[in-house]
Structure formats: structure tokens, C-alpha cells
Amino acid sequence: MPTHYDRDAYAWALEQAALLRSGKLEQLDTEHLAEEIESMGKSERRALVSQLARLFMYLLKWDHQPERRSRSWALTIQDAQAKTVRLLNENPSLKGSLRELVADAYEDARRAAAIETELELETFPEQCLYSFDEALAFTAGET
């Protein structure tokens, strides 16, 4: 008896993989399998937006609170840059959507920066001042 997708997604995924490997294509749950594949792609997109938002938030904090700059902030910026590059290397088709991804990430970063810094949201520009390349090339000075 096959596992139902809604009752045990993990067992269902293992069964679907086994069916694929054994060539039993007619037994595949194609509708849910297609949904899962689409979901994987969306997950990679969300991960990239999340890292970009983290990067932009720390760049905003760096620019708007110079008196609070720290080694920790510099290392967080470097970490977000590295993870962004890794995600793009693993998912090069996302490069075609960078303008949209940067815009989405910046909206999130702006709100997060306002929360973390306790500065007014209006303190931070509505439009992202950093290009994608500038954000990746940014090097925090020694603190």
C-alpha cells in the first residue's frame, strides 16, 4: 500500500524516489511530485532572498550606525556575501531574476534594519542604494 502524500511526506518522497529508480513511472504520484519539484525551486529562491536581505540589512546598519560598527557586523557581511555567491553558483538560473530578488530582499532588509537599530523606517532609503555587485564587493574596514 503506497504512502499518501498528505500523511507522511518523508515516506512518500522515499517511495517516489524508489519508483523513479526502478523505472516504475506509471506508479508515480505525478501531481504531487511536480508540486514538490516546483517547491524546491521556490525554496532556493527564498534562500537567496533571505541571504540578500541579511546582507543589505547589515550594510544599512553599517552605513547608518557607524559608531556601532563591529568585527561581528563585518564577519556577518562576509558570511552573507559568501552564502549569496554559493546559492547563485548552485542555482545559476536565478541570476536572470537578480533585479527582482534584490528589490524583494531590500524591502525585507529595510524593515529589519529599522527594527534592529530602533531607527525610524524612513531613515533608510526606499530604493536600494547598493547594486548587487557593490553589495558583494563591499569590504568592511577594520574596527
Image (spheres, rainbow, N blue to C red):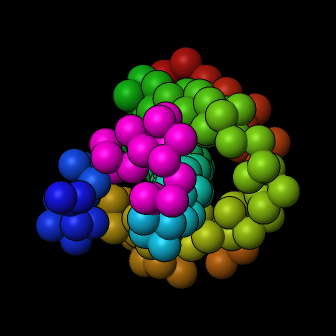
* Image coordinates for residue 4, horizontal then vertical, percent: 22, 66
For the question of whether residue 110 can be seen, the reply is: no
Q: Nearer the viewer, residue 80 or 14?
A: 14
* Image coordinates for residue 97, horizontal then vertical, percent: 78, 61
Residue at the spot 42% in from the left edge and 65% down from the top edge: 29
For residue 94, side relative to residue 125 (left or right): right
For residue 52, side relative to residue 99 (left or right): left
* Image coordinates for residue 25, horizontal then vertical, percent: 53, 53
Q: Nearer the viewer, residue 103 or 40?
A: 40
Q: Is residue 131 above or below residue 21?
A: below
Q: Quadrant of residue 104?
A: bottom right
The N terminus is located in which quarter? bottom left
View extreme (top): residue: 142
Question: What secondary structure predominates along the stretch shown in magenta?
Answer: helix
Q: Where are the magenta residues, as a range?
A: 13-28
Is 26 included in the stretch rendered in magenta?
A: yes
For the question of whether residue 107 can be seen, the reply is: yes
Residue at the spot 65% in from the left edge and 34% down from the top edge: 90
Q: Quadrant of residue 107?
A: bottom right
Q: Is residue 38 above or below residue 70?
A: below
Q: Nearer the viewer, residue 4 or 73?
A: 4
Q: Nearer the viewer, residue 2 or 99?
A: 2
Is 33 included in the stretch rendered in magenta?
A: no
Q: Is residue 116 above or below residue 126?
A: above
Residue at the spot 84% in from the left edge and 56% down from the top edge: 96
Total marks shown come to 0
